[in-house]
Amino acid sequence: MTGALKRVGMFGGAFDPPHVAHVALARAAVDQLKLDELRIFPTGDAWHRAQAPSPAEHRLAMARIAFGDLPHAVVDDRELRRPGPTYTIDTLRELKAEQPRAELFLIMGEDQAVALTRWREWQAIPALATICMAARASASADAPRALPAEAGLKLLRLPDMPESATEVRERVAAHEGIDHLVPPGVARYIDRHSLYQPA
């Protein structure tokens, strides 16, 4: 392994809250891509979200709980500290500057992959990182076709996992159980801090 490039993954998201499918995707990325490190980035001011996310300190704390036991995973708070809108290209460039000899992998779900061509400077991303998309058994065949050939794409195999952060928030607001949707520590955190309650 002498001289082998360090393999570093980047996995960003609102994580509002992080749920079991997020953790499964992170674990699949570490295992299938043989990552030496997976950086988890809770997003700051996400330019594409119409609704403001929960406060940064809660999303950061929940991410640390959710991914804390995953080998090689590191929760990175730089996007939360960065002023102004959060763009993936900026974070990728920072990672490349910090680890110029590392091989970078950008981890994303199918919904993100389909929207990739609307991202800021998306054409510059494939030169910095290999794009890796979660491919569930029932995943739409349209996602890979929606990306231009120059984007490149590597698929990560995952079982069908329908969980979503929206469902978690809606169930909490309706006083329904979420233990099957989020890691146990995240469920306790949500309850302790009374997150996602109706106004």
Image: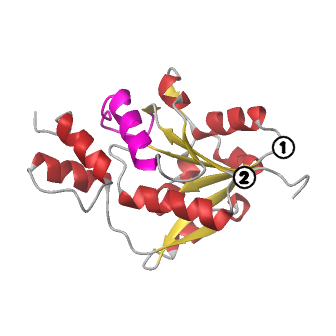
Give the amino acid type for the residue marked by disc 1 in the picture.
Answer: Arg
Residue that sits furthest to the top in the current view: 83
Find out whether the residues at labels 1 and 2 contact each other: C-beta distance under 8 Å.
no
Mark whose residue sits in front, 1 or 2: 1
Residue type of the residue flagged with mark 2? Pro
The magenta segment: 46-67
Callout 1 secondary element? loop
The quadrant of the rendering that contains the N terminus is: bottom right
Which image quarter holds the C terminus? top left
Q: Residue at x 32, y 57 (%)?
A: 164
* Residue placed under numbered mark 2 in the picture: 126
Please say whether residue 25 is visible from this viewpoint. yes
Res 76 quadrant in image: top right
Image quadrant in which you'd find residue 58: top left
Q: Which residue is drawn at 36% across and 40% down?
A: 62
Q: Is residue 94 left or right of residue 72?
A: right
User: Residue 112 at what x, y percent from top left?
Assistant: 49, 55
In the rendered image, which residue does mark 1 sit on? 101
Kindly state the secondary structure of the residue where label 2 is placed.
helix
Give how far across and how far down residue 83 sits, in percent: 51, 20
Is-magenta flag for residue 48? yes
Residue at 30%, 37% (x, y): give it. Answer: 51
Q: Does the magenta stretch include residue 107?
A: no
Residue 57 % position (x, y):
36, 28
How far from the left and from the top, in percent, is residue 41? Answer: 52, 40
Instruction: Name the foreground residue: 169 vs 32.
Output: 32
